[in-house]
Image (cartoon, grey):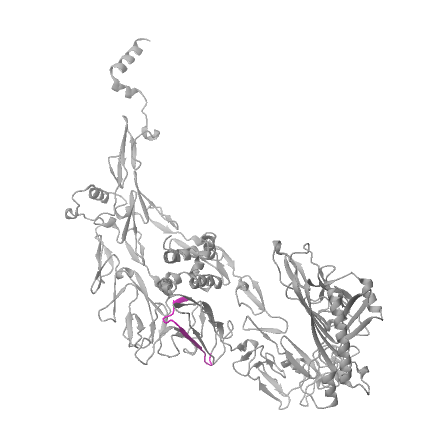
Amino acid sequence: MGLRGSVVLLLLLAAPHARSLLLPDVDECADGTDDCHPDAICQNTPKLYKCTCKLGYSGEGKTCKDIDECDNDFNGGCVHECFNIPGNYRCTCYDGFMLAHDGHNCLDMDECMFNNGGCQHICVNTVGSYECRCKEGFFLSDNQHTCIHRSEEGMNCMNKDHGCAHICRETPKGGVACECRPGFEMAKNQRDCILTCIHGNGGCQHTCEDADDGPICGCHPKYIMQLDGKTCLVREETMVEISESNATGGTDVDKRVKRRLLMETCAVNNGGCDRTCKDTSTGVHCSCPVGFTLQLDGKTCKDIDECQANNGGCHHFCKNTVGSFDCSCKKGFKLLTDERSCQDIDECSFERTCDHTCINHPGTFECSCNKGYTLYGFTHCGDINECSINNGGCQQTCMNTLGDYECQCHSNQKLHWNKKDCVEGSLPDMSPKVLLRCTKSGGSDACILSCPSDVHVISDIQEAYTLTCGSSSRPKKKQQSTNESTWLDTSAIKISVTFKLNEGKCSLKKTEMFQEGLQQIISEKHNSVTESFYYVNLTCSSGKKVHGDFNRLAAAKEMFITADFELETNQKEVTDVCDLRCARKRTEKRLRKTIRTLRKAINKEQFHVRLSGIDHEVVRKSLKLSDSPEFCSLGQVRVENRCVSCSVGRYYDGEQDLCVLCPNGTYQDEEGQITCEPCPSPHNPGNQNLAGACSISECGDQCSPGEYSTDGFKPCLPCSRGTYQPETGRTSCFSCGGGLTTRYNGASLFHDCETKVQCSPGHFYNTTTHRCIRCATGTYQPEFGQNYCISCPGNTTTDFDGSTNITQCKNRHCGGELGDFTGYIESPNYPGDYPANMECTWSINPPPKRRILIVVPEIFLPIEDECGDYLVMRKSSSSNSVTTYETCQTYERPIAFTSRSKKLWIQFKSNEGNSAKGFQVPYVTYDEDYQELIEDIVRDGRLYASENHQEILKDKKLIKALFDVLAHPQNYFKYTAQESREMFPRSFIRLLRSKVSRFLRPYK
């Protein structure tokens, strides 16, 4: 081994302590073999290791105990609340305050900066809170946000002299009793209210103590009181002197606090950090919360403007706030629960959006009306009085009907094919167009109804339809005592009959079966009966649906077929021995026999309808489960899983299951029809150049506007001087009247008549006086130089005469639906402008032990009229009764409030001045046991501070869900947590969760 090796070995054996100088050191801290406390720092040493408790903990290192920095006379340096956390502490502020950058002080939050604090009139910020105030002549309502007009009469709660500082209640004996708002105590005089520390920390910035005369404010030892006695200012000294007299007997806690106050530690001025401070072995480490970024000094936090990068992730609008940002949406969109995305509001899914048809568009919607109706008030449909527009174009008499109109002719004349002119013709010749032929062959009855033209189909629901053939006669308004009138009364025969089947379904489809049999029906002379009608109405309605798998139809029961027949007595049967009444009885007897045969044919499925030469079955008794589980109505086809009616100019072809263009020589001016009407040109049926005619005017060779002929077809003559014709296919021209002439032959408009004055819109030219007359109330005229005014649609009228636009036609009905649990009121003509000089009253009388909650999403009243239009809600019609709400201005911010009385009398009144959109106000009645909860919610300013919260109060679907729960609290449990998150933003849920869950689910 040698001498050197032996010496080394001897040294190691002789000096064990020298072994550590030669062997490599083991780092127990790195190996995790130390026994330091988890809240201690392990420091490796040459011999072993050392344990030292982390800052914020006390002990020798093997055991460490958290120091409660808040448990001392300085409250951890926090001016409001101090919360101890493992190894550290955190300061928080009371409601109405926000944490200062030093992490310890609390500063007042100005609630009036956000949407005026939700106040209707004036918002006044106070230390730790805010209050709403009213303008002169108004006082604050119980909801602490809206204002009510004072009364000058009587000693009651509506009078300015009632003396109550806050809330006034009327007593049963007719006096008044005062109450204070939450956070105030009643003074000894039972009128004034004394502020307590509960409300806004008593107006104190730091500490608050209640005294008999009100709160006494104090400051943290690091601060001194300012002259106002409420706010505090930091002392000039940078460190707090800790006097020995305040020591806690030299405990370890106070020693540790002293030591940390004398070095850079999070316990002193938050370590100099703006926000979060953390003590580490190398000193303090500052960090910033989400929404802030740490600056180069390592101490200061600067707000991040999230809207600068990708619009903050917002779909539409981004608004930066301190430490965060808010997303909002364009009008017509709503913010989704992720509080980023915007979704189009489907207004068509709301109740009562449009009277007839609603079409949703991104950000808006559009209402349209059925044929014969026009739009007014943006969403409502009213019948068009076509007769007020140039007499409907009728040559003689015009009769308006709902959704349509009809031209009528004088005696001994009949209506032309254009349905407007009258031509000479014998009245008894009603030109029957519909034939019913029944025959008995081989012991079986079969019938076919032939409709060559004038076919109309209505099929709005599945398994039902109405088919009309020909034109129905209408009774004359006036009957004269002539033989002809007697003939009119006795010659027309109308009969209605209903056929009942125990099973089957309505089916008006093309059929290829029994073609030979059908031909036999038509051609066979013996054993057959034939009746001619000028009008037949055939209605088929199937029985109830039985829902099974895949929603397939089971056997339908009690199917009904109703047939209305109109015909004329056969004049050939009138003889010297059998007068018209006798002939009528014979016709009726023959018709009853035909109906008996028809009944048998229907029961045997041997009844068919021939429409424009194509045969259709009327009913199918045998149902097959293999049939398509979903049906479209008659005249409709399925397009992308929805039923669409065949458009005008087309008809439904059952064999191809397609909408087909009307062939050349035909037209169709209505949707959802199964045939096309032949063009009324007997000599040239194919004068059209193209298929798919949408109206009779597209049939070829008709006289153009400014022309006429005896039959409406070419060759035509121009209208002579003094006459005009605005339509095609007419047999005459209209006279200008009053001896007026036209500038040339072939005039097509009344404009062409040389009137003495040119009338402006809102007037019509009177051809008798040759003056312009203002359109009467209830009529309007938007054009220059017309000789008529147009009647307002439906039940609408105008505020004054001389109206120039249909928008001036308004419904004067006071709208709304009043129910025991939920309902709404709305101004007349809403959402159009309400009429002038209106007065509407509503009364809400809830069931016993229920109170009323009102939500006003928005209200539009003109402010130019000096409160000429107003809405008021009070206990009764008396002006001195307790008033809950009153306004005469426009407020687009929503407000919710509870009624001050158990029932409400509501009045809306408008003057003759300006008008506006008005209002639609929903309400709900709730159990009075929940009064405290409801008032706690609606009086919370946070409900109105956020724009997103305001949109919730305007969202009809969300309000309906909220009212559903308020009216019936047990329905709260039918909304799962997932559904709630999908319906409401997180901020709104956080606002209500503690209130609602604590009240409705106290044991969970």
| Left or right of 650 in this view: 46 | left
The residue at 51%/74% (across/down) is 829
Towards the viewer: 727 or 536: 536
Towards the viewer: 320 or 220: 220
| The quarter of the displayed image where residue 172 is located | bottom left
The x, y position of residue 831, in whole percent, is 51, 71
In the depicted structure, whether residue 736 falls above or below residue 354: below
The x, y position of residue 781, in whole percent, is 59, 80
| Left or right of 455 in this view: 840 | left
Q: How many marks?
A: 0
Residue at the farthest front position: 443
Towards the viewer: 38 or 902: 902
In the depicted structure, whether residue 155 falls above or below residue 466: below
Residue 836 in magenta stretch: no
| Left or right of 97 in this view: 653 | right
Can residue 425 be seen? Answer: no
Can residue 147 be seen? Answer: yes
Q: Look at the image and tell me in which quarter the N terminus lies.
A: top left
Residue at the farthest top position: 2
The x, y position of residue 253, in whole percent, is 21, 43
The residue at 45%/53% (across/down) is 977
Magenta segment, which residues? 895-913
In the depicted structure, whether residue 696 falls above or below residue 940: below
Towards the viewer: 460 or 354: 460
